[in-house]
Amino acid sequence: MTMEHWEKPAYKNWGAKRGALMGWALNLQHFRENLKLVPGGETGPVNDTARESAGSRDIRIAGGAAVSH
């Protein structure tokens, strides 16, 4: 999607796709804990990956350089 279409959720159905992605992420235990939602959520390898990725303090720049906080 380009910036010219950001205000058109129906363009290539991106509004529904974003909603589905958010729904999937919010079902993961890690996200629910971080957002202080009702306890529970899905566990498993995907949840573990989300937890490990969020624990990283590095920010990756497009060229691959790491910047630490």
Image (cartoon, rainbow, N blue to C red):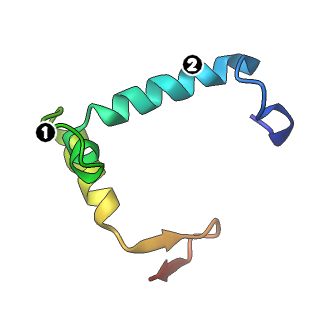
At numbered mark 2, what does the secondary structure look like: helix, strand or loop?
helix
28 relative to 66 in the view: left or right: left
User: Which residue does the image show at 76% across and 35% down from the upper left?
Assistant: 6
Q: Which residue is mark 2?
A: 16
Observer-nearest residue: 61 or 23?
23
Q: Quadrant of the C terminus?
A: bottom left
Q: Amino acid at mark 2?
A: Ala
- For the residues bearing labels 1 and 2, Cβ distance under 8 angstroms: no
User: Which residue does the image show at 36% across and 28% down from the upper left?
Assistant: 24
- Front: mark 1 or 2: 1
Residue 2, above or below 15:
below
Observer-nearest residue: 31 or 54?
31
Relative image position of residue 35 (x, y in whole percent): 30, 49
Mark 2 Cα shell of 10 Å, populated few (<14), some (14-19), many (≥20)? few
User: Which residue does the image show at 17% across and 32% down from the upper left?
Assistant: 42
What's the mark number on residue 39?
Answer: 1
Relative image position of residue 67 (x, y in whole percent): 51, 81
Mark 1 Cα shell of 10 Å, populated few (<14), some (14-19), many (≥20)? few
What's the mark number on residue 59?
Answer: none
User: Which residue does the image show at 34% across and 68% down from the upper left?
Assistant: 56
Residue 62, above or below 11:
below
Marks 1 and 2, Cα distance to the nearest angstrom? 26 Å
Observer-nearest residue: 14 or 62?
14
47 relative to 17 in the view: left or right: left
Name of the residue lying farthest toward the right: 4
**Mark 1 vs 2, N-terminal side:** 2
Relative image position of residue 31 (x, y in whole percent): 29, 45
Q: Amino acid at mark 1?
A: Pro
